[in-house]
């Protein structure tokens, strides 16, 4: 591997981190703007949810294919094409005059993000293959990626207040230009060597399978026993089983099963899925509570989420210093437990409660726990991956978070609707019923984080030296 000058390596980290920030924050930047967009375009409540879901669904469903395209076609080339397409899709969404066009543009954004994200993460692995610098680089990258959801809420509030909801999409053009120019000048090309073939049947079954599952969960609002819900969930499960069978038989699978059957790496992937559920789902309902119940304006609502971002950013450097001393396992067990405490605090929201008493403490505690998760989890998910599997492993790491988020959002919407309907039947007024629904979402999120803590305790085992890539480790990729 050709070693980059030290300055260029850290500039590459800056460019790649900016890329990851953009693709993650676009999952939530529209959240604060949704009430304004809904009024402007006449969106139904279902269409409002799909403005968020279309992005994370297309992103997650196409990530595995995007990872293989990056491996085979070239990671830098894939990154640059994805960046241009992402910018064009953002412009299309920003000028949309109908709900259908806005949702289609969001799906297109997600599709190009599925090229960008695995290419960026694989390029990071190339640039920082092992040792202390890799730990630092992945801590920075993971923290920025993890804080992206919270940053999106703040940025969305600022842009909606002072400009328009449309600028929540159009602002991406600035990021795209900076990252594209930086990518051309700083990043080095790399790809998998040898004869490469695309697993088209695997790509088709996993994309349709994940899409069917997410759509089935989104229909759960109609009832878990409704025919449409059961059909789409059943088809999705069948297609995912077929995908696994295909991957076991083809010579060059879209997702080599050796990537996910490793116990430690599998635990990290499950953790990322749960984090996706919580960050994408819970952050939407925090934003709705701030605006609908507390009557915050878009800017005020965005700024009100800032303590979540701030606590992540303050605690991440501390977690990064703690990681070499204690290893990843204590952080990935303790972090989810702390997040769960924050979500339990949020589940106690009431119609007459104040921001300072009922939301602020929970968000701060959540941020502390999330920082402990973000610092080690992506590094652990990619540790020890073979050079030819870098893109596929990077795609899996991203896909678990995005698919977790899209399924979680659908399930949370069903829980919210069920809780609200039950409260209305009990005679509560609509605002009190909404708050009951929000509380159920936060409680379900807390339970999900407790599950993540158990997964980490059971699956992420071994000496800390074995769980962290060391200098000279044989996980270096060939760079051209």
Image (cartoon, rainbow, N blue to C red):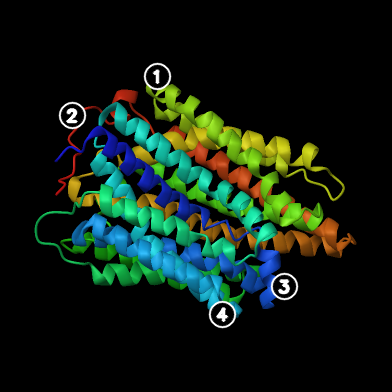
Whole-number angstrom distance, CA of label 1 to CA of label 3: 52 Å
- Within the image, what quadrant is residue 263 found in? top left
Q: Which residue is mark 2?
A: 472
Taking the image as shown, residue 15 lies to the left or right of residue 188, namely right
Whole-number angstrom distance, CA of label 2 to CA of label 3: 57 Å
Q: Which residue is mark 1?
A: 325
Dot 2 alpha-carbon crowd within 10 angstroms: few under 14, some 14 to 19, many 20 or more: few
Q: Which residue is mark 3?
A: 39
Taking the image as shown, residue 317 lies to the left or right of residue 38, namely left
Measured from the top left, where is residue 6 in percent x and y? 25, 33
Whole-number angstrom distance, CA of label 3 to CA of label 4: 15 Å
Label 1: element kind:
helix
> Residue visible at 41% across and 58% down?
176
For marks 2 and 4 on the same chain, the one whose residue lies earlier in the sequence = 4
Whole-number angstrom distance, CA of label 2 to CA of label 4: 51 Å
Mark 3–mark 4 CB contact (< 8 Å): no
- Observer-nearest residue: 165 or 109? 165
């Amino acid at each position: 591997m050709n070693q980059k000058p030290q300055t260029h390596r850290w500039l590459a980290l800056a460019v790649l981190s900016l890329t990851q920030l953009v693709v993650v924050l676009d999952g939530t930047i529209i959240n604060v703007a949704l009430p304004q967009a809904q009024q402007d375009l006449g969106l139904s409540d279902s269409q409002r949810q799909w403005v968020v879901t279309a992005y994370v669904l297309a992103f997650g469903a196409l990530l595995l294919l995007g990872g293989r395209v990056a491996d085979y076609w070239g990671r830098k080339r894939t990154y640059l094409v994805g960046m241009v397409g992402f910018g064009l899709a953002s412009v299309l969404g920003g000028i949309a005059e109908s709900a259908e066009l806005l949702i289609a543009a969001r799906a297109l954004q997600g599709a190009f993000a599925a090229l960008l994200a695995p290419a960026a993460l694989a390029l990071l692995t190339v640039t920082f293959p092992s040792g202390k610098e890799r730990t630092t680089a992945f801590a920075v990258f993971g923290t920025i990626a993890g804080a992206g959801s919270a940053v999106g809420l703040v940025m969305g509030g600022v842009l909606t207040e002072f400009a328009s909801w449309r600028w929540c999409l159009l602002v991406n053009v600035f990021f795209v230009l900076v990252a594209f120019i930086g990518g051309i000048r700083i990043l080095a090309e790399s790809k998998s060597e040898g004869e490469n073939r695309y697993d088209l049947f695997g790509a088709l079954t996993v994309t349709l399978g994940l899409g069917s599952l997410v759509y089935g969960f989104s229909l759960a609002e109609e009832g878990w026993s409704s025919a449409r819900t059961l059909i789409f969930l059943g088809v999705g499960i069948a297609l995912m089983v077929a995908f696994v069978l295909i991957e076991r038989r083809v010579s060059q699978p879209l997702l080599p099963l050796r990537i996910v059957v490793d116990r430690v790496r599998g635990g990290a992937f499950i953790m990322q899925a749960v984090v996706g559920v919580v960050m994408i789902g819970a952050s939407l309902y925090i934003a709705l509570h701030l605006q609908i119940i507390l009557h915050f304006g878009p800017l005020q609502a965005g700024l009100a989420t800032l303590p979540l971002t701030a606590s992540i950013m303050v605690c991440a450097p501390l977690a990064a210093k703690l990681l070499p001393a204690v290893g990843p396992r204590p952080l990935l067990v303790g972090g989810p437990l702390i997040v769960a405490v924050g979500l339990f605090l949020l589940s106690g929201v009431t119609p007459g409660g104040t921001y300072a008493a009922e939301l602020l403490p929970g968000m701060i505690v959540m941020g502390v726990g999330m920082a402990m998760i973000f610092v080690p989890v992506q590094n652990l998910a990619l540790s020890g991956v073979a050079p030819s599997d870098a893109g596929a492993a990077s795609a899996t790491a991203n896909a678990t978070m995005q698919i977790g988020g899209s399924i979680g959002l659908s399930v949370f919407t069903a829980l919210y609707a069920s809780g609200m309907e039950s409260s209305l039947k009990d005679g509560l007024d609509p605002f009190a019923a909404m708050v009951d629904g929000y509380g159920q979402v936060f409680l379900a999120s807390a339970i999900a984080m407790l599950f993540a803590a158990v997964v980490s305790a059971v699956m992420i085992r071994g000496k800390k030296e074995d769980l962290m890539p060391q200098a000279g480790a044989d996980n270096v990729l060939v760079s051209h």
